[in-house]
């Protein structure tokens, strides 16, 4: 895929996170210009590309606020693709889940994805150009029976999967391809710290996930849409 993304503008939400950094790095290697919304006033210290000439950081962008999301996308020229990695995870037995906690999980994962998809699609349709959208669901969103304490998280990620399929169907024939990846456990420093006794070799590497996402947003993807790509590693 060398240079297939050369000069193309791509949004990466959650781009300052562990997976986001890997995805941004992969896209930069393909020549893309990455627009990264950040909820805070400055990029976190672990983000490896704060001063890269093709990384456009936008601070204080609340992805659950439709006005801020729309304003951010309005500032992205010639949008080619939008990748939605921003989200969160909490686990609790169903009898201990508070209504506010359930709503927060839905906001963090499903609402932010919807608002960013909507803004990206509006931009692409207005420009009458083709484009690519990639969401991130999860293995739990496709198979909620795996694990315990996953009710709120699984519901929010299942909503992302359902939106992906519905949007892909609605946008048939309009040149916008909509897909999602569904990782199991990603091999991140945070996950290693939380599960020090796990077999890390069975987890999905950030590089493998970034490679799959990069293909889905590339012009080489001519027809793949409405697909939920399982990234389960050896689990």
Image (cartoon, rainbow, N blue to C red):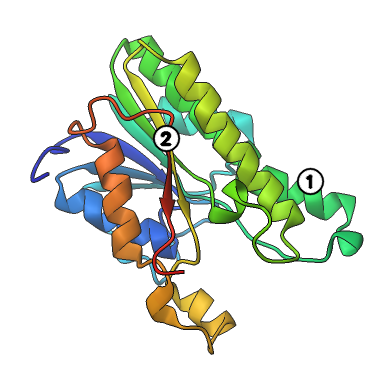
Name above or below for residue 177 compared with residue 57.
above
Circle count? 2
Quarter of the image with the N terminus in it: top left
| On screen, residue 234 above or below 85 | below
- Residue marked by disc 1: 103
Task: Describe residue 231's horizontal placement relative to residue 50 as left or right.
Answer: right
**Secondary structure beneath disc 1?**
helix
Which disc, if any, is residue 204? none
The residue at which mark 2 appears reads as: 227
Report, in whole angstroms, how far the alpha carbon at label 2 lies from the one at label 1.
Answer: 27 Å
Where is residue 30 shown, x and y percent of the image?
Answer: 15, 47
Query: Marks 2 and 1: which is nearer the front?
Result: 2
Q: Secondary structure at mark 2?
A: loop
- Which residue lies most toward the bottom here? 197
User: In the displayed structure, would residue 19 be above or below residue 99?
Assistant: below
Residue 98 picture location, percent across and down: 89, 56
Q: What is the x, y in percent for residue 48? A: 31, 66
Q: How many residues crowd mark 2 within 10 Å: few (<14), some (14–19), many (20+)?
A: some
At which x and y percent is residue 150? 71, 60
Residue 146 seen from this side: yes
In the picture as drawn, the residue positioned furthest to the left comes out as 2
Q: Residue at x 36, y 21 (%)?
A: 176
Q: Is residue 49 visible?
A: no
Question: Which residue occupies 45% across, 23% down?
Answer: 168
Q: Residue at x 26, y 53 (%)?
A: 211
**With 64 as the anchor, is 179 left or right in this view?**
left
Label 1 packing within 10 angstroms: few (<14), some (14-19), many (20+): some
* N-terminal label among 2 and 1: 1
The answer to whether the residues at label 2 and label 1 have Cβ atoms under 8 Å apart is no
């Amino acid at each position: 895929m060398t240079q297939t993304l050369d000069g193309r503008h791509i949004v990466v939400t959650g781009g300052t996170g562990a997976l986001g950094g890997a995805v941004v790095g992969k896209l930069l290697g393909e020549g893309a210009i990455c627009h990264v919304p950040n909820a805070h006033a400055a990029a976190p210290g672990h983000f490896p590309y704060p001063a890269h000439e093709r990384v456009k950081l936008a601070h204080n962008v609340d992805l659950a606020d439709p006005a801020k999301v729309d304003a951010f996308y309005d500032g992205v020229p010639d949008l080619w693709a939008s990748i939605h990695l921003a989200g969160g995870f909490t686990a609790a037995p169903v009898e201990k889940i508070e209504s506010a906690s359930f709503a927060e999980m839905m906001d963090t994962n499903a609402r932010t994805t919807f608002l960013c998809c909507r803004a990206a699609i509006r931009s692409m349709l207005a420009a009458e150009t083709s484009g690519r959208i990639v969401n991130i669901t999860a293995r739990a969103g496709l198979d909620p029976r795996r694990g315990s304490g996953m009710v709120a998280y699984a519901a929010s990620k299942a909503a992302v999967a359902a939106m992906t399929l519905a949007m892909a169907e609605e946008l048939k024939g309009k040149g916008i391809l909509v897909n999602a990846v569904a990782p199991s456990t990603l091999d991140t420093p945070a996950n290693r710290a939380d599960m020090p006794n796990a077999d890390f070799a069975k987890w999905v590497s950030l590089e493998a996930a970034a490679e799959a996402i990069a293909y889905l947003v590339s012009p080489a993807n001519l027809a793949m849409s409405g697909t939920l790509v399982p990234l389960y590693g050896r689990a």
